[in-house]
Amino acid sequence: MKSIPQHIPMDQFEVQNNSLLIGGIEIPQLAEQIGQTPFYAYDRQLIKNRVQSLRDTLPTDIHLHYAIKANPMPALVQLMTNLVDGFDLASAGEMKTALDTEMARQHISFAGPGKTDKELRQAIAAAIVINIESDHEMERIAKFASEMNLTPKVAIRVNPDFELKASGMKMSGGPKQFGIDAEQVPSTLKRLTELKLDFYGFHIFSGSQNLNADSIIDAHNKTFELAYRLTEFAPRAPRLLNIGGGFGIPYFPGDTRLTIQPIADNLTRLLPAVKNKLPEAEIVIELGRYLVGEAGVYVCKVIDKKISRGETFLISDGGLHHHLAASGNFGQVIRKNYPTCIGNKVTGEQAQVNVVGPLCTPLDILANKMTLTQAEVGDLVVVFQSGAYGYTASPEKFLSHPPVIEVLV
């Protein structure tokens, strides 16, 4: 019997009877209980552990918000209600999920470009914080608020004049659809004072999926300095400063896990000045992927095995229609394999294989030329790092295959 392959994240998961454990349940047993493959499984204890680890490391004055877009599964969001300090959402559907929890309305915020009239009216009626993405959106909010005789809490989402270096997805620093350019914010704030809107604060978000602590520290330093400058133009002292997140998780060989302690130390150094210059502001770090990404797996079954011109193909009942990111079609420039194993045969003799799905496209690849335990028809393929941007970030309707199941265990 060979040792457990290095690519399997055993700092997160355990093995029993040569089967991967999720939520203390062996993968074959879990598949039998669910009654079908493919499925996503999210380990609630791993999520709790991740949040607690952050609580133990970050300064106590830092508030944690969960970005629902990372994984909006209702049961998972309900779990988060008692773990984090707030929710950040990006659609009416996510708003409904958040409002079905016991999270206080003032700790729920709505961001994203292209909010519809209906979504803005719903957000105003729900009394959640609305992050303004443009001057036009601000005028629409004010118009609807006047018609409804309500005064909504609003924050300005700022497109800063700097970027989060080394991030997997840059959200600032140039022309962007996200937020109002930093240099335009003073004029936006001047107009806001003339409207029946309750200025609540700023949302300054630079990028995501960053594994470099120094880059995040640099972005935090610049974010607070920008907030200080913009506050001079605000109609009142901010009660909220969302400094974004950007904390990444390791997906591929060579990725180094983000070290949180230096980030926490820098925040501790910055907070005395923050309290002095922004005495009423709740400082929020908004995280999605970092909280749930490593706690989830995607499981599918091998339904055929074939050899084509010397290469072995494991054809599964899962694919990019359920897990677009693992196929490499969710932003990768050069496709890389997510950590993957045969869940019911974690160790054993190994072979190089391609794991593909049932779709009629050569893009439907879950693992390309990857060394896995030798698998046969009926074995279970497990794709790790699947707790965020999985099912709801995928084209489920493509070729009309059955929907995937999600479970929180």
Image (cartoon, grey):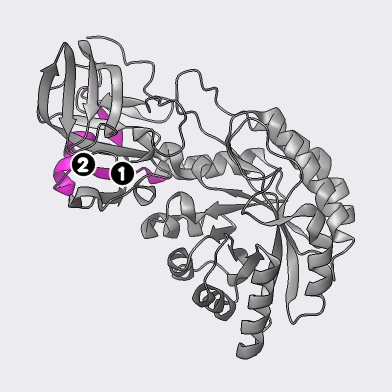
- What segment carries the magenta color? 18-44
Q: Which tag, 2 or 1, sits closer to the chain's start?
A: 2
State the CA–CA distance, disc 2 to disc 1: 9 Å
- Does residue 313 appear to the left or right of 238 in the view shown? left
Q: Is residue 122 above or below residue 251?
A: below
Tag 1, which secondary structure? strand
Q: Residue 373 appears at what percent x and percent y?
A: 22, 17
Q: Amino acid at mark 1?
A: Ala
Identify the residue at image location x=70%, y=65%: 155
Please give the residue where the numbered disc 1 appears in the rendered image.
Answer: 41
Mark 2, other Cα within 10 Å: few <14 / some 14–19 / many ≥20: some
Disc 2 vs disc 1: Cβ atoms closer than 8 Å? yes
The disc placed on residue 349 is none
Please give the residue where the numbered disc 2 appears in the rendered image.
Answer: 30
Numbered disc in front, either 2 or 1: 1
Identify the residue at image location x=45%, y=40%: 293
**Which corner quadrant of the image does residue 14 belong to?**
top left
- Does residue 235 appear to the left or right of 107 in the view shown? right
Closer to the camera, 334 or 47?
Answer: 334
Q: Amino acid at mark 2?
A: Leu
